Each structure stands twice: as structure tokens, then as C-alpha cells.
Image (spheres, coloured by chain):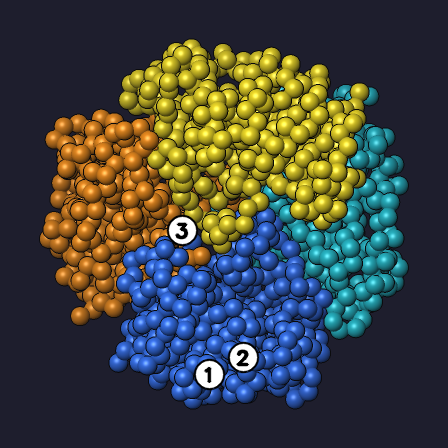
Chain colours: A blue, B orange, C yellow, D cyan
Amino acid sequence: MTHSIAILGASGYTGAELVRVLSTHPDMEIKTLTGDRKAGMAMAEVFPFLRHLDLPLLQRIDEVDFGGIDLAFCALPHATSQSVIRALPSDLKVVDLSADFRLRDADAYRKWYGKPHDAPELQAEAVYGLTEFYRDQIRRARLVAGTGCNAATGQYALVPLIKASVIDVDEIIINLITGVSGAGRSLKENLLHAELSEGTNAYAIGGTHRHLGEFDQEFSKLAGRPVEVQFTPHLAPMNRGILATVYVRGDGQTVYDTLSAAYAGEPFIQMLPFGAAPSTHDVRGSNYVHVGVAADRREGRAQVFVALDNLTKGSSGQATQNANLMLGIEETTGLTMAPLFP
Amino acid sequence: MTHSIAILGASGYTGAELVRVLSTHPDMEIKTLTGDRKAGMAMAEVFPFLRHLDLPLLQRIDEVDFGGIDLAFCALPHATSQSVIRALPSDLKVVDLSADFRLRDADAYRKWYGKPHDAPELQAEAVYGLTEFYRDQIRRARLVAGTGCNAATGQYALVPLIKASVIDVDEIIINLITGVSGAGRSLKENLLHAELSEGTNAYAIGGTHRHLGEFDQEFSKLAGRPVEVQFTPHLAPMNRGILATVYVRGDGQTVYDTLSAAYAGEPFIQMLPFGAAPSTHDVRGSNYVHVGVAADRREGRAQVFVALDNLTKGSSGQATQNANLMLGIEETTGLTMAPLFP
Amino acid sequence: MTHSIAILGASGYTGAELVRVLSTHPDMEIKTLTGDRKAGMAMAEVFPFLRHLDLPLLQRIDEVDFGGIDLAFCALPHATSQSVIRALPSDLKVVDLSADFRLRDADAYRKWYGKPHDAPELQAEAVYGLTEFYRDQIRRARLVAGTGCNAATGQYALVPLIKASVIDVDEIIINLITGVSGAGRSLKENLLHAELSEGTNAYAIGGTHRHLGEFDQEFSKLAGRPVEVQFTPHLAPMNRGILATVYVRGDGQTVYDTLSAAYAGEPFIQMLPFGAAPSTHDVRGSNYVHVGVAADRREGRAQVFVALDNLTKGSSGQATQNANLMLGIEETTGLTMAPLFP
Amino acid sequence: MTHSIAILGASGYTGAELVRVLSTHPDMEIKTLTGDRKAGMAMAEVFPFLRHLDLPLLQRIDEVDFGGIDLAFCALPHATSQSVIRALPSDLKVVDLSADFRLRDADAYRKWYGKPHDAPELQAEAVYGLTEFYRDQIRRARLVAGTGCNAATGQYALVPLIKASVIDVDEIIINLITGVSGAGRSLKENLLHAELSEGTNAYAIGGTHRHLGEFDQEFSKLAGRPVEVQFTPHLAPMNRGILATVYVRGDGQTVYDTLSAAYAGEPFIQMLPFGAAPSTHDVRGSNYVHVGVAADRREGRAQVFVALDNLTKGSSGQATQNANLMLGIEETTGLTMAPLFP
């Protein structure tokens, strides 16, 4: 059975990535694409790489007829999703890719995003979209909140370890290197090729990145008490990919065994051999996650390494995986394409 | 019905690309992988991006049992394919990705490759693998010779024009920019990131590139008399992609109309609007070809632009497309994945 | 003796490159920097790579006191230079890096830039800044017009050949690959790292690029009759560098000998051995030009290859070289830094 | 007064970088270049970017006459320097860029480099070449050992802090991102453009990188007791540049003030404003170091960020700075070229 899909905000990178993924999905069909500023245009004009597809024209959201749509992906900018989703038919299944419903707590939202939430009742309803850890709730959810791409990467390293109490939750450092597509199609000087290629820098330093809100929320919930990690993201000259290097206190082998056990049945998470380091090169364009663990030369310390593609597993692939669950489709459907290498 | 596939020479880039493409092909199953120097290793060790797949171990060619294999892709280095293929069961279907069977003429082979051919009888039998122009022969062939990736790109610009006699065949210049994966997994200083990124240069200048042998062969055949084009390839800091900028004498609009007519029913060839230039960004990782045409400010002169991915449409995607035909599978099966952007 | 320098429009790439070059120039001192939108800011804020220098703050042009300034570099956007320079003290030496004074003919300016020129009297006065061919006039000039970076590259391949009548001027094709800094610090989607890295495309196709105005002007003057070349620029994922591949009709060895003779005494132009191809990697960040020649396999045809750095020799290095001449400083002063490799 | 210089091992990246730096040094002249495997070749053949220079041919070390040479830079591979330097005239000043004399302790050398040292008596004599902290000893030294490029970067973050006892030496994590030229001109698959561009990975994980030997040596000496840090290097797709992100326990403002005071008079070290993050883009090709500090959201924790160019300040620029001191030349001579941006 084919499900009818709408993508709201299809003119950004996560919207385009959804179209890419869904273009070979056997059980979903794109019926509606919106893009307010580019309404009336063909996707082939906005994204020539999609030229081979037969797609509906972009239209304005307020022109969409949602009758007949089974599920809407909402790939709008942060802070605009909440009012848009509130206005959608209340029985429409929605996977939101913005930051608007990631934080369940109204105060936490205000703290990290600097304004009150416009749809606090939906905040409570939304299920956090980290598939491997919220699978059952997602299956039953009407509204799923896609996670931050950095937040997802860090959590793949840490959730099973905190759950199993094999590391010290007060001594966690998440060091992360991310590709530039995570910043979206924004026109900023530091995202120009001339200024970004051939160099690297940290940003949002000192514990100011908004994805910390997700870490705090999820890790505190698991630990049963407030947990605050350290987190420094870096921008590297690559278009896709996130590598988290997570410094933990705990026994390296135990850390490895705990993660291996937790991910044993997971279709998209690949444990590397103990002591091996994953590379973002090996997951590009795919929904796969590579996880490695090393024991440090200092006893009782270890590093966990997680590599994934921020646009696929970190965003639009994750969204599709969640939509599969919500629509009763087999979870991996349409998502088993191999990474692109070289 | 699932066909059983062998990939000979799976430890290079075209071999790995075949595995990537076939990993989601519904009607082919990889039964055998060879790699003489890496025999005994798992593909996950040679190419960690394939870690999620359940693949046979690499073995030595002489250890392979070809009973039960329906088709073999031969992705071995140039000059080694000819003796290997000669030794295969004579009823085994073979798609060769090397340069060994591209030239039908023994003298031409000796001229461009500097040695006599070891299997001249197979040279005569092999069908040239440019699918759109040899479709019927490929369907009936036992041995198909994959084209040079540069040669394919140039021919997509020119074959319909020469066929229709709308350009002057004595005044053709093929200027080409290619990504680095075309050079294979070779350890050479000029292919190091430190020496290749952030710059560009021409190579094989003055009409010395071996793919000229293919241009000469195919264009002369079409024109009914010897045709020699000028051809200058350039290496640019990108991993995948070829852009051919072809300077022709002819009317721009006629050139555009001729190509549009020729490619009207082709599933993988996309004509851009007249006057638009394609980009290799928009075909990366896919089997699609983007074609553009511009009339020059000087009357009677035009440029044709062709963009494709050298590893997919220029090599392993083309090979799969040909294998589909040879095995009676629908031609586009397994090849409709969208390009990866950004 | 130290000369006092003003840089008008110091907040763009050519302005910053002037500061870089002049920072170690023994005979020039930067006294004034302007940047209207960034007036009041320190260069270290606009360009942190200049943090180690003790520089004047950026100010508005209308606040500048030009008394005591010996020479002004004008690195303003195209079409804004003409009125600014008209308003400068009439005895102030000026090197303009914009396109405003490259074309001597008012009609040609209108044709290529789409508007009448605001200072036609200065158009007539300005000397075209291709140092090697206008050295004597530049030495005596008050106003020198920096050339287009692509235009300079093509001319290094062709001027001596047209002068010596060793090629057919009606059969010239300039194929060019350029880095992205030539587009300036402009916020455009196609200049984002995510959209520009790892791919290439032609632009301004069919003979529409404005630098054709310079080719037409200079080549027609040399040939004594109208000359129109074909010219196709391509954008490659590199920040600096231009490679021109110029297809000419003429004897390869004669072409090589003519260029070798013309450039024998030139301090910045390096002839490669006959048959060798230059690389933009080898000139990055320097004022040097590498020139190569190959005879084509087709008799009577040859290719000339020219590599230079668009920001240095193609713009700010050229400007400094011209300023040296205008101020009576030895021509190479401050410009002999080696290229940066890797 | 001009000093005569020999560069032993000029055919690698650090050798070439020495030639680049010295090519505009007013007080040093390159008299001898060696490269055993490339003996007899011109540098223009080995490194075409040096084509404009008039340089001696490469020769074999055993053919060199060291009479008249004032100082030799030894840029040979690790483990080969020790016997070469032992055989040099005992009064020749030497700056070694290899790892051979970085560790003063014979056991430490054996531990990190896996073999006994061939010249232990020179190990004791060699001065560690981190200029800012060994300036006086370097001035008087005959043999100076260039530091590891990663080791230098980490030490710029930490030496003043450990000296001033403002951080907990048992809780130091050095997370580092490095460009690829640090690996030298080695032919390895993971250094190919096709495999390195557009992705990132950690390497030498778990505390196995040899530069840890330098950290242990220097930090333990400063602390007066054994200190072991955690250190994880990452490879990013850039040719030059190292960014160290150092996690420390201490008050952010105190950390900033301590570093600011320590580097107040240093010509090459630039402190950014408190809370600002440096970028490797801003030091490329230069001898400058950019240092930033952020207080973490968790009290008593801070991050120090250090950016430098591994080939210049991390290797050949440092070597030149040390050579200046050893020869009685003003320390910054020849080293004030601005970074290359973009």
C-alpha cells in the first residue's frame, strides 16, 4: 500500500534530502511540496539534482489540501514549525525536522531558544524521534520531533552507557566535528567555500550550543537526576557527516560490551571492532551509524566514537525511519542504500 | 528471479561501486568477490563503508567456481582483463569494466595501449558498452566492454550530432574536467589530498589520452571516414564527476533540437533548457546524465555540456545497466537512486 | 623612501589581499583603509587573518584626508569606482582594481556593463594594467586599470602570439577553470561550500562573460582588425587559481618559441619545458605565472596553458606591481614571495 | 651578513617549506640541498612551485662539503636523522625537524619509537625547540630539536597554565584536528584525495600517538611530577593547519589572563578576545599562532583553543625562528609574512 506524503519546507537541504530518500521508497509517494518563497517553482529549478523526478510544483502551505495526505514531514526553519503544525488537521501524522518539539519542557525551550513556545500543548504530545530508544512510542505517535543531528550523534555514544550505569555521568565531554550542511542553505560569509574549505574552527563554545538542551533532557531522564555534559562542536570542510569523540570515565572493554549488546539487533548501527575508529567517509549519504570504542592509556578512561551523516541518519533518514514506524511500514524500508564512497 | 553475480577485482573503486549499486538491486545477488592481493579479507576491511552488507569474502580468481554464476563483472586493471576473461567459461556472460575490449581493432589497441592484444578473437566479439547507442547488440551480447568514463561523456555530447550530420566533424574540441576517482586507488603523489585539493591542471595533453582511441573508433564509424577530435582532460579537486565542454561548429538551436530528439525516450539522460549549463554536483552518485547546449556569440558555433558521475554512469552504473539488458531485466532496475546533494 | 598608501574598499577579498601583500612591502605603508559598511571596525574583526598587523581602522571614504597619500588602490565593486575616482584629488595616483576603466571605449563599456560610463574622460586616460605589455605607459600613468583576472590569464597565452602573427586569430578558444575567490565575498547559494565543493560547472556560457570585452579590445588592437574569441569559464572547487587552456591554430614549436622569447626577461613569468602542463597548485598565493605549450596530435594545432593566482597576479599582486612602477620603486619589490604548497 | 645554509632532506614537505620560507629571508642563503633518492634533480622538478628560484641541485648527503656551511636544517624521516647528524662536523649548527631528538630520555625514546636511540649522547645535548619557552637555551645551542607539530600546538595551550599552577594537571584532555600535510608526502590510501576529502576520523586513539612522549616530558618537568594527558588527534580534509581544543579544569578568566600575560611580548602569538574561537584559516602559511579561551557553562572548567600552521609554526617556520636565534639574527626575520586567506 502506498502512503501519500507532504513535505512542508522542501526548498532547504533537509527537505531536498527527504525527496532524495523518498524517491526510491516503495511505499511512500510525494503528493505535496511546499516552499513559501519559491511557490510556483519546480523542484528541478530549486534543486537541479532532482531533475529526473516527476514531482508536484512547490506551493504555499496555506494552499495545501491535506485531505488524502497520510503523513506530513515538516522541514521548516526553527521556530516556524510550531505554529504551522498547530494549524494542521489534528489527525494528520507529522514528523517535524525542526528544533521546535525536541524539548518537552516549556522552560527548557525558553532557555535554549530565547522565546516562549507557541504550542506548549503539542510539546507535551510530541515523541522524541531517536528511533532506537523511542521505537514503541514513535509507533503510536501522531507527532514525532526529529532530533538535533549533533544531539543524535552524541546520544548514540552515551544512552546505553548511562542506562547501564557504566560511566560517570558527571565527567562526560562530547567533542564533535560536523560538516557544513548542518547549517542549512544559509547565506553567511563563514559558509562560503572560500572561507570554509581548507580549515577548521570550534563554534558555540563554552556550552552554548542549543543541542545541549537535548543532551540535558535525555541524559537527566536516564540518570534520574540533573546531568550536564561538556560539548564543543567544530566545523570542518566537508558537506556531510558528524563525528563525535566522546570522553568518558569507565572501563573501555565494559563500555564496548555495553554498546555492542545494546546495538546487537539494530539494523542501522554498526559496531566496529574494539579499538577501531570510524570515519564519516564511510557513512556518507546513508542511514548507517558506525560506532567505535577505545580504552585510554589512563585506566578507567575511554573514548567512544560515533560517525553518521547529519542529513540522513541525523535528519531526513531518521525522519523516514520514524515515518515508516508511524505508518506501519517495515522500519528499514527505503533506507538501506549503501554509503557513497569515495 | 534473482541472478547470481561475480565481481572480479572487487578491491578497486569500480568494484566497490558495483557492490554499492548491486546492494539494493532487487534481481541480482553477489555470490562471488575476487581480489587477488586481498584474498581472504572481508570487504568491510577493504572498504569499511560496505560494513553493513553480508558479503562473501574476497578470494583468488583461480579459486572461483563459476558454475551457478549468471554474469561476471570484471573490474580488473587494464591489460589484465584480457587473459582472465579468455580463461572464463565460454558461456558465462561478462561485463568488462577495463579498457581491454573497448577497441575492436587490433592495431588500434596496440597503438593506444602499447602492446599486442592477448585475446584478439574476443576483441571482435565484444560489444561496445555505451548503452544508449548499442542497446540491441548489448541485449544479445555475451561480452560487453565498458567504455572509458571520459569517452562516454564526450560521446553523449557528440554521437547524435555526428549521426545527424549537423556539425563539422573536423572541428571538434572536447575539453573535459574530471574528478580524481577516475584514476583509481593508485598511490601517486599527484593524487594525494595535499597535492590535488585546491588546484587544477591539464594532463595527457596534446592528444595523447587513451580514450582518444574510443573517440576515433566511434566517430569515424559514424562519419564513414576517419575523424580525429582534439581532447584535453583536466583534473579538478573533486572525487566524482566529469564535465565535458564540447566546442562544435553548427547551429546552436539545431544542435539542441538534435540532442533533445535523440534523448527524448532515454531514462537516464536529462536535457536542460536551451542555454543552461549542467553541473557535476547534480549527478553525483547517480546514473543520470545532464546535457546542456549554448549557442556561441559567434554564429555557427555552439558548445555542448555533459555532466555525469564517472564511477556510476561512466563505469559501474553503466555496467549494471548493460547487465540488466543481458540478463533480460528491465533496463533501469536498481539504477534510479537520486544523486547525492549536497 | 616609504610611500603612503590608501586602500579604498578594504573589506573585500582583493582589498584584503592588498593588505597581505603590502604588509611585507619595504617601501609602502598603509595609512588609510576604507570600507563604508564596516566603517569604524578594525581589520582584525573583518579579516582575523590580519590580526597580527597594526593597521588603521576602516573609515568611510568621505571622511578620508588624501593629503599625504601617494597612491590609492581602489578595490571597490564594479560600477562604483568610476564616481569615487572622479571625486579624488586629480593629482593622486590611482590603481583601480574594478572593471570600471578596463575598456577604453564608451560603447564597449555600455555593451558589456549595461549602462553608460560615469567618467568617460577618465576612461580615455586610464592605462590598461597588464604590466608586461603596458610597462612604459604604466610608469607614466596617473590612473591604471587593473585587468580582469580571467582576461589577464588568457592574454598571457595569446598577446605575444597575436603580435608575432604565428596563430590564426579567427580560431581561438579560451577554455578556463577558475577558483571561487574571483567571485568576491558575495553571499550566493552557488558559492556556499555545500554547493560548490566536490563539483564543477561552466558559467557565463556562449560568449557572455564580461572579460570578453577586454579580449576583444586588446586582441583587435594587436591584430589591427576586429577579433572575437570563444571563451568558456568554469568554476572549480578551489579558492585561488585560474587555469587557461587555449586552443590555437599554429605550429606548436613556433608557439612555444614565440612565448619563450617574449617572456625571456620577465621576472614573474615562468616558461615550462615544451610539452609540460602547469598547475594552479604551483602559483597559489604568489605573483608568478606558469606557462606551458603542447603541440596537438593534429598538425597545425596547439594548446597554450597558463596558470596564475587570480587574487595575486590576477588582481592585487598585479596592482602592486603597477604601483611599484608608478612610484618609481623596483618593479618586483614586495612581490617575490614563493607560492604556498601544499 | 648572509649565512650559508644546507637543507638535508629537501624533497619532503618540511624541506620544501624551508625553501619557501628561506627564499625571502634576507640573511640566509641556501647553498646545499640534499635528497638521496632524487639526487641530481632540480628542485623545480620535485616541487614545480619553486621553479622561479635559483637553487642548487639536489645531491646525496655523502657528497656534501660542509665547509662554509653555517647551519644545517635536517628534514629527514624519523629515525634516520640520528645517525646522519652524528656524522656531521661537530661544530656545525643543526636544527633537526625530525622526531629524533625531541625526547631527552633514552627510555622514553625507546618506549615511543620502538627502538634504542643511535646517538644518545646527542639526545642529551639537544635543546627542545619550542622557541617561546626555550629561547635562551636555543640561542646557545648547537643542536636544536624541532618539536612535533601537534605537540607544539598542545603546549601553546598548556605550558603557561601548568607553570602558573592554575589548572589541574591530572584532568587535561587535548582534542586536536590536523591537516594532512602533517603526514608528509607518504603514499598511503587514506591520504589520497578520494579517501580523505569530505570526511573526518580520529586516529592513534586511546593514547598511542607519539607526540604524547613530548607532552609527558614537558608537562612532567613543569609540574615536578609525572603528568599524563589524554590526547586524541583527528584528520580533517585540509592541507595545512592544526586546531587544538584543550579541556582544562580551572577558572576561565584566570586561564585567559594567565595566557595573555605569558604571551604579552611574543611576536608570533596572538590572543583573541576572551570567548572567541580561533580558526586555522587565519594562520595558514604563516608563523602566527592564534589562541582563544572560553569558560565552560560548568563552573571551574574551561577550554583553550590554539590554531597554527603545522608546516610553518609547527615545523619549518619554527625551525627558521630557532635558526635565527642560533645565528644571532633578529628572531622574527623572514617570518612575518601574513597568512594566506582565502
Mark 3 element type? helix
Q: Which residue is mark 3?
A: B281
> Label 1: few (<14), some or many (≥20) within 10 Å?
many
Residue A101 bears which disc, if any?
Answer: 2
Kindly identify the residue that appears in the image at 60 percent across and 58 percent down. Answer: A235
Spatial CA distance of label 1 from label 3 is: 34 Å
Q: Chain of mark 1?
A: A
Q: Which residue is mark 1?
A: A143
Q: Picture coordinates of residue D154 (x, y %)? A: 74, 55
Q: Picture coordinates of residue D173 (x, y %)? A: 72, 64
Q: Nearer the viewer, residue D144 or B118?
A: D144
Q: Picture coordinates of residue B193 (x, y %)? A: 52, 45
Quadrant housing residue B151: top left
Q: Chain of mark 3?
A: B
Residue B301 seen anywhere in this rendered image of the structure: yes
> Label 2: few (<14), some or many (≥20) within 10 Å?
many
Mark 1 element type? strand
- Tell me which amino acid carries mark 2: Phe
Indicate whether B290 appears above or below C116: below
Mark 2 element type? loop
Q: Are marks 1 and 2 in contact (CB under 8 Å)?
A: yes
Quadrant housing residue A100: bottom right
